[in-house]
């Protein structure tokens, strides 16, 4: 079994730098894909890569100019209801629907591009469908 050494101390130092950052607000919108400082996380939570703990993320929902719901991407081939395939910048990727989280604008590093409106709508429906507590597909009369 391969043992991975987590870089929690490095991440905490870097995270403190991100938090104290006083730069201009990046302009971001739903459907954008950015390099994002995801961090070093625990267990099955997805972590960032490289020295600055980044991973591409899709901005699924913009809450305000400070925060958004981001979904990480992976280039590893994945199938199943937890993943949504995506061709982006000539590469096959997958949106990881189970790893969505609210993120602060200071985590954004660099915009990579954006997906089409139809692909954004598909991603929004896939995310909502996976996370809906209502599994029955019929309408219920609540009178």
Image (cartoon, helix red, strand yellow):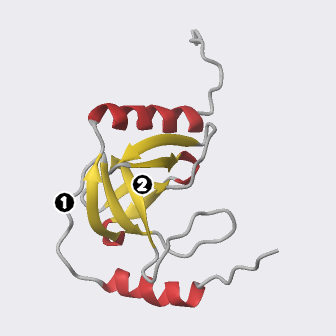
User: From the viewer's perspective, is 43 left or right of 103?
Assistant: right
When asked about the image quadrant of residue 2, the answer is: bottom right
Near-viewer residue (89 or 61): 89
Residue at image mark 2: 70
Residue 98: where, in percent of width, then height? 58, 49
Q: Give the residue at x 48% y 47%.
A: 95
Near-viewer residue (70 or 4): 4
The answer to whether 54 is drawn above or below residue 59 in the figure is below
User: From the viewer's perspective, is 65 left or right of 79?
Assistant: left
Earlier in the chain: of badge 1 and badge 2, it is 1
The answer to whether 6 is drawn above or below residue 99 in the figure is below
Q: Give the residue at x 46% y 78%.
A: 50
- Residue density around tag 2, few if under 14, some if 14–19, many if 20 or more, within 10 Å: many
Q: Give the residue at x 40% y 43%.
A: 87
Residue at image mark 1: 27
Residue 35: where, in percent of width, then height? 35, 65
Query: Which element carries disc 2, helix, strand or loop?
Result: strand
Tell me the quadrant of the picture where the C terminus can be found: top right
The answer to whether 13 is drawn above or below residue 111 in the figure is below
Residue 49: where, in percent of width, then height? 49, 73
Query: Which element carries disc 1, helix, strand or loop?
Result: loop
């Amino acid at each position: 079994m391969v043992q991975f050494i987590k870089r929690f101390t490095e991440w905490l130092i870097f995270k403190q730098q991100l938090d104290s950052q006083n730069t201009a607000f990046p302009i971001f919108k739903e459907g954008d894909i950015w390099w994002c400082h995801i961090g070093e996380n625990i267990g099955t939570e997805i972590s960032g890569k490289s020295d600055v703990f980044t991973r591409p993320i899709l901005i699924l929902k913009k809450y305000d100019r400070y925060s958004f719901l981001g979904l990480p991407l992976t280039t590893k081939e994945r199938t199943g209801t937890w993943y949504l395939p995506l061709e982006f910048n000539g590469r096959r990727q997958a949106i990881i629907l189970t790893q969505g989280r609210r993120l602060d604008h200071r985590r954004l590093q660099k915009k990579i591009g954006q997906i089409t409106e139809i692909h954004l709508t598909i991603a929004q429906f896939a995310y909502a469908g996976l996370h809906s507590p209502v599994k029955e597909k019929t309408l219920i009369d609540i009178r």
